[in-house]
Amino acid sequence: MNDSADSGRLDGRVALVSGAGRGVGLAIARTLAAQGAKVVVADAGGAINGEDPDASVAETVANELGDSAVAFTNSIADAGAAQAAVALANEAFGGLDILVNNAAILRDGFIFKADPADFDAVLQTNLAGAWYLTNAATPTMRQHAKDNRGGAPYNWGRVVNITSTAGFYGNFGQSAYASAKSGMLGLMRTTAMDLARAGITCNAVAPFAATRVTDTIVPANDEQAVYKERALKVSPDHVAMVVAWLCSPKGQDITGQLFGVRGREVFLFSQPRPVATLARDDADWDVTALSEAAAENFSALYTDLRTDLEVFNTDPKV
Ligand SMILES: NC(=O)c1ccc[n+]([C@@H]2O[C@H](COP(=O)([O-])OP(=O)(O)OC[C@H]3O[C@@H](n4cnc5c(N)ncnc54)[C@H](O)[C@@H]3O)[C@@H](O)[C@H]2O)c1
């Protein structure tokens, strides 16, 4: 890496990273701070299922980052708390240029056995929390764009949604988590559209990284066991660098995209678009006609049911 070309790219910028106390979010917070940004370390410090909050998790990270950071320790799964987190960025550092929606919890269970309360908690944290923060943060970013904060033009305003391949491949027992993560893709696309005129970008990143979550994967078959062993070798720092790139001036023209990061592999994912079309000009469809036309035009194109853990089961580049 060329240090002179690559350092200090986020000087004068302020970032809010949810779930920055551990794992992927911690790596992102450290990397953004190392690139010169001030960081609001927003983390409630709970267990993987969201219970037992612990303020010391975010406070320890903020202390480590020193003058570059402040801790926000309330749960972001609440609209008022999201407003308060953004207010803290404004008070402590005079603005907010970057939002990384990374906080998430897991409460797995097969769809036919799962508890609706677990679904509600997962959606509230992983999807509603991201919506609340985006809703709270983007008025400040739009104002910065109008004011040309830091000098004209304001080439900033970044939202990065940390999603998961579980949201578009799926995985056993993760109906709540996958629903929230795929919801983040719709949120990402619409946020990108709503903010395009202001020059503010929004993208999604699906990480693969060794964290406490990877550690708790219970393999459902041999392929998943191999996946877990390989996943535990992958540092979250690679994900953080891709997020830093999207948040840098070089990310200005990239919006509405879905990326993945697994060690030194960076993926650009396609987004669902029709891959085949059945169309009739002369009559409505009936069951027989649909069956015959689908067998001919769709059946070879149906998406298989492999989980994300089975698809990404090659040796990572680390
Ligand atoms: N690790 C992987 O391989 C992987 C794979 C796919 C997606 N992800 C995604 O990456 C992100 C980070 O995951 P991780 O593996 O680092 O998990 P992690 O559990 O290590 O970190 C998540 C952090 O979010 C915090 N958090 C949870 N709910 C919160 C709330 N309501 N308010 C504030 N903070 C809250 C937790 O306290 C925790 O510190 C998540 O969005 C996760 O879905 C990770």
Image (cartoon, rainbow, N blue to C red):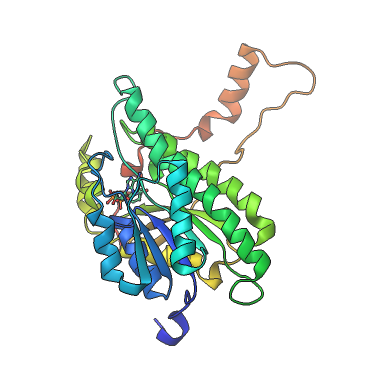
- What residue is rendered at 59% in x and 24% in y? 294
- Is residue 62 visible to us here? yes
Q: Nearer the viewer, residue 25 or 175?
A: 25
Is 24 on the left or on the right of 54, as rendered?
A: right
Q: Residue 255: where, in percent of width, then height?
A: 58, 57
Is 20 on the left or on the right of 46, as rendered?
A: right
- Is residue 175 visible to us here? no
Q: Residue 307: where, in percent of width, then height?
A: 35, 38
Of all residues shown, which one is farthest toward the front? 91
Is 279 on the left or on the right of 29, as rendered?
A: right
Q: Which of 290 and 81 is in front in this view?
A: 81
Of all residues shown, which one is farthest toward the bottom? 4
Is 194 on the left or on the right of 93, as rendered?
A: right
Q: Residue 155: where, in percent of width, then height?
A: 61, 70
Q: Residue 196: where, in percent of width, then height?
A: 66, 56
Of all residues shown, which one is farthest toward the right? 282
- What residue is rendered at 30% in x and 53% in y? 314
Q: In this view, does 122 lie above or below 315?
A: above
Q: In which quarter of the image is residue 88?
A: bottom left
- What residue is rendered at 56% in x and 41% in y? 272
Assign the C terminus to one quadrant of the image: bottom left
Q: In which quarter of the image is residue 284?
A: top right
Q: Nearer the viewer, residue 89 or 171?
A: 89
Assign the N terminus to one quadrant of the image: bottom left
Q: In this view, does 68 lie above or below 229?
A: below
- What residue is rendered at 30% in x and 49% in y? 44
| Count of numbered circles in the view | 0
